[in-house]
Image: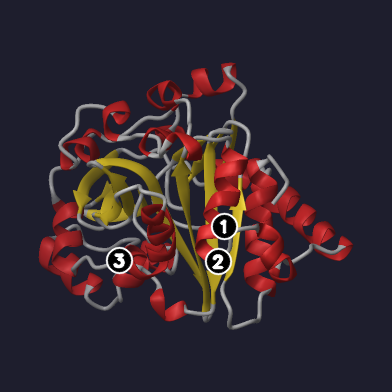
Amino acid sequence: MNSLDIRTNLATEEYLLNKWDKQEPLILFYIQKPSIIIGRNQDYYAELNLPYVLKEQITVTRRLSGGGTVYDDLGNLSYSIVTQKGRAFGNFKELTQPILTALQQLGVQANLTGRNDLIVEGRKFSGNAMYQKGTKLFCHGTLMYDVNLAVLPQALSVFPEKLKANNVRSVRSRVTNLKPYLTTCYQQTTAEFRDLLLCQLFAVSDLQMIQEKQYQLTSYDKSQIQSLVTSRYSNPHWIQGNHQLATYTVKQRFPIGTIEVRFELSDRRLHQVHFYGDFFNQETPTDLEKALEQAPYELTALTDLLKTFDLSRYFGPVSAIELANLIYKEPQL
């Protein structure tokens, strides 16, 4: 895609997910100016160093998928695979394999680790996320090729438990760029790296050989994409989301990601419950939040209530007792 605006690129991705009806997967590559993309379930104000972001005029938006906040600039290559394989939701091993294979063919000994990270020599260069709609989904992620890594710790705020889980002390020490791991002949611009990766993915020596596979956006497509930019990706209500201040907050790092719960208590009953975090979900937990309204603040009662929900659709594989224990543990005032 030719746009350097993350809002247009995410809108294009969403539009093509809705439109794409072929069995053959669609792959998108896009590069953008400095931008921060917040995960679907995260708190805008908790993820950013806002004074720095505003001073540097970094574009901020929110995506449809869960997961954590990422920073992109012109040294990052983002990718998205649109597929009919809705059943593959959460299967990062399957959907990132084409990217990993292409990188390995270029001499980068990359692999998948944890739930959704691609690493080389123990350091992360790619975070990935998924969004499902009906029988279709997209799996998308970053490929940090030549990103200005000094910006990351200044622009983003990271939950300390996440760093501890990865045995690192800072964001900067956890991540790396791909460029140093490529031979000199492959150390090109980000756009040239994109073209090189495409050739590897399609097993061709020149992009002209797969030109007929390229989908060309029509004028109608572009108008629909612009509508999505306006209604969602540049809309402050979508970007800033539901920032709920609460008297009580509990937060924990699980294998599926961080879950934070904010709520009020009155007469030992829950009120105004809201979930935040970098978990991956097929549904937003709105129904669960409503069900917890006026629920007894008691461990057994909470567990029994949570057992009536398929929590995996809201958070991934987390049990009712685990979530009840989180809500019931001593909250931070």
Image quadrant in which the C terminus is located: top left
* Mark 2 → mark 1, Cα distance in angstroms: 6 Å
Q: Is residue 264 visible?
A: no
Q: Amino acid at mark 2?
A: Phe
Element assignment for label 1: helix
In the drawing, what numbered circle is on residue 126?
A: none
Q: Is residue 297 visible?
A: yes
Q: Which residue is mark 1?
A: 198
In the drawing, what numbered circle is on residue 316?
A: 3
- Give coordinates of residue 102: x percent, y percent: 43, 58
* Mark 3 → mark 1, Cα distance in angstroms: 32 Å
Q: Amino acid at mark 3?
A: Gly
The numbered mark, 3 or 1, whose residue comes first in the sequence reads 1
The answer to the question of whether label 3 and label 1 lie on touching residues, with beta carbons closer than 8 A, is no
**Which residue corresponds to the image point at 19% horizontal and 32% vertical from the top-left?**
168
Query: Is 114 on the left-hand or right-hand side of 321?
Result: right
The answer to the question of whether label 2 and label 1 lie on touching residues, with beta carbons closer than 8 A, is yes
